[in-house]
Image (tube, grey):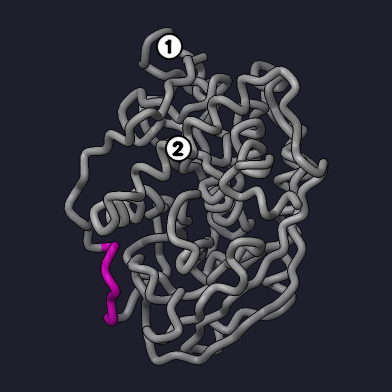
Amino acid sequence: MKKIILFAAVVITILSCQNDSTDSASPTTNAISNRGCASQEVLEAQMIADPTLAIRMNEIEAFTQNTISKSNFRLVSGKIVIPVVVNVLYRTAAENISDAQIQSQIDVLNKDFTATNSDFNTIPTLFAGVAANIDITFELVKINRKATTKTSWGTRDAMKKTKQGGLDPTSPSTTLNLWACTIGGGILGYAQFPGGSLTTDGVVIDSFYFGLSSAASYPYNLGRTASHEVGHWMNLRHIWGDATCGSDLVSDTPTHNTANYGVPTYPHLSTCPGTPVEMTMNYMDYTDDRGMYMFTLGQKTRMSALFVSGGARAAFGI
């Protein structure tokens, strides 16, 4: 198990924006072979556009580390219930996903974040002691729908802006906004980390992979893209730390070489120092929906720190 390293400075090699981070107007295909999450790339682009973002994220990380180090750490108001607004942007009937499919996504989030998902019982014995019930639930409060002529939206947040044809977020300081639309570029979804602008805060999920979708969406048809992306929205990093043998700033997750895809056969050994068994079933890996089904106690503590007094999402806990 790796040590938590203080995120005292955001040291990221700023990459040039990738092709999947553009607002594409070309037709896209739904055939995606490996999970693609653009949250890290979007963060890097936001840091280029707003150098003060790194300062805010440093402050959030310092607060997080200080909070979780306290022996009496607890949530401000006990159980957290997150109000959710879903913004559907559609050009085709298929993109205009049903109320039932939207509710199925909320149901998946509620199960995954309360450890009531049926596959939680399949967690290997090695990790059973750190498997966590996050004890955060989600409540659908509104669905907004808007017709569009766009064939894909990219990852530059256009879907979050009414002036660019999208839908502005609703009460983002106290509401989780989800956008369902065609992203393109092989991206299943992306989230904004705490510290970013409220005008773009929330999670984007490709409508083809939103909720319990059709068999055609396999292997991403079980709603776990949202579980992964909401994890980012709650300040979780990819489990491999977006670097070879990197750190996700959580103490009870094993060090991973890099992202895992598909459903790796257990035990999957890392070649990082100590050759730990990788936690490929963690929601913050890149495995298929059926291959991810747990958060850890360390991840729970990290997420919970957002909602205490002074935390980046404390308004949700009031």
Residue pictured at 40% horizontal, 65% vertical? 31
Q: Quadrant of residue 310?
A: top right
In this rendering, the label closer to the viewer, 2 or 1: 2
Residue pictured at 47% horizontal, 34% vertical? 61
Residue 215 can be seen in this image: no
Q: Which mark is residue 275?
A: 1
Q: Quadrant of residue 49?
A: bottom left
Secondary structure at numbered mark 2: helix
* Amino acid type at image mark 2: Glu
Is 22 covered by the magenta stretch?
yes
Q: Which mark is residue 59?
A: 2
* Amino acid type at image mark 1: Thr
Q: Residues within 10 Å of mark 2 (few under 14, many from 20)?
A: some
Residue pictured at 77% horizontal, 63% vertical? 139
Say above or below: 34 vs 198: above
Say above or below: 185 vs 245: below
Q: Position of residue 261 (x, y in %)?
A: 44, 41
> Magenta stretch mostly in which secondary structure?
loop
Residue toward you, 140 or 259: 140
Say left or right for 291 vs 181. Answer: right
Q: Position of residue 116 (x, y in %)?
A: 80, 43
Residue range of the region highlighted in magenta in the rendering: 20-26
Residue toward you, 181 or 68: 68
Q: Position of residue 12 (x, y in %)?
A: 27, 38
Query: Which residue, as the protein is rendered here, is positioned at the far left?
Result: 16
Is 125 covered by the magenta stretch?
no
Q: Residues within 10 Å of mark 1 (few under 14, many from 20)?
A: some
